[in-house]
Amino acid sequence: MQLSKTPTIKYIKEPTSQAWVEQAIANLDIILLDHSHCERKAAGVALNLMFRYPSNAKMIKMLTAIAREELEHFEQVNQWLERRNIPLAPLNAPPYGGALNSQVRRNEPERMLDLLLVYCLIEARSHERLGLLADYCPEPELAKFYRSLMASEARHYGVYWILSTTYFEQKIVDKRLEELAIFESEILSNLHPEPRIHS
């Protein structure tokens, strides 16, 4: 059963479970802290791609905008942390990101395609989960904040998708995205015991 009242991006193979929603809502402070880490990492992802592929002009232009927006969101989430007296602190990373990155092939150009599609899927899942937080968060102002970020998550997904189809044939992109999307859902099939955006 689809939990969210908000449509999700079609490449999400399996919807998030009710168990994740319950875990997240019961641990909103930890989820906010992890969200801060996620926004910082997302800005870093865009910057790392720019350094790795510096001659790809379209990629540089589009990822510059993403990095800027991710840092703005990082600042906004940190303002929420400050309001709630939650100190910035390290958190153990869930297995999600590492598992997805383990599927990235080592040789170019396959490596570039896989990186773009992995980040595409992460943004798609973020869109879904922020929608669930917006739907189920018992604090109206915080729920409104989560809702406000959803459009940008979908847009970031779209940027990585556009870049993948700019540099690779559509049929190659579709096939590889299908493979990675199945794997992405398998990672999340068992709820991680520590509450995280991607647990």
Image (tube, helix red, strand yellow):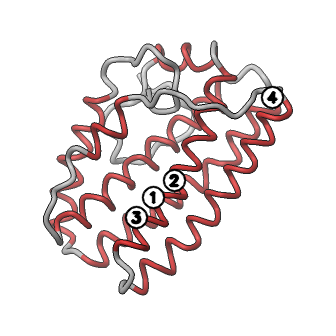
Residue at the spot of label 3: 160
Q: Residues within 10 Å of mark 2 (few under 14, many from 20)?
A: many
Q: Amino acid at mark 2?
A: Ala
| Of residues 157 and 89, the one drawn nearer to the viewer in this rendering | 89
Q: Secondary structure at mark 4?
A: helix
Q: Secondary structure at mark 1?
A: helix
Residue at the spot of label 2: 42
Residue at the spot of label 1: 45
In this view, 94 is above or below 35: above
In this view, 57 is above or below 87: below
Q: Amino acid at mark 3?
A: Tyr
- N-terminal of the two: label 1 or label 3? 1
Q: Are marks 2 and 1 in contact (CB under 8 Å)?
A: yes
Q: Position of residue 160 (x, y in %)?
A: 40, 64
Determine the image quadrant of residue 110. Answer: bottom left
Rounded to the nearest angstrom, the CA distance separating label 2 from label 1 is: 5 Å
Residue that extends furthest to the front in the rendered view of this protein: 90
Q: Position of residue 164 (x, y in %)?
A: 31, 69
Q: Which mark is residue 140?
A: 4
Question: Left or right of 40: which side holds 77?
Answer: right
Report the residue at 63% width, 23% height from top: 30
Q: Amino acid at mark 4?
A: Pro
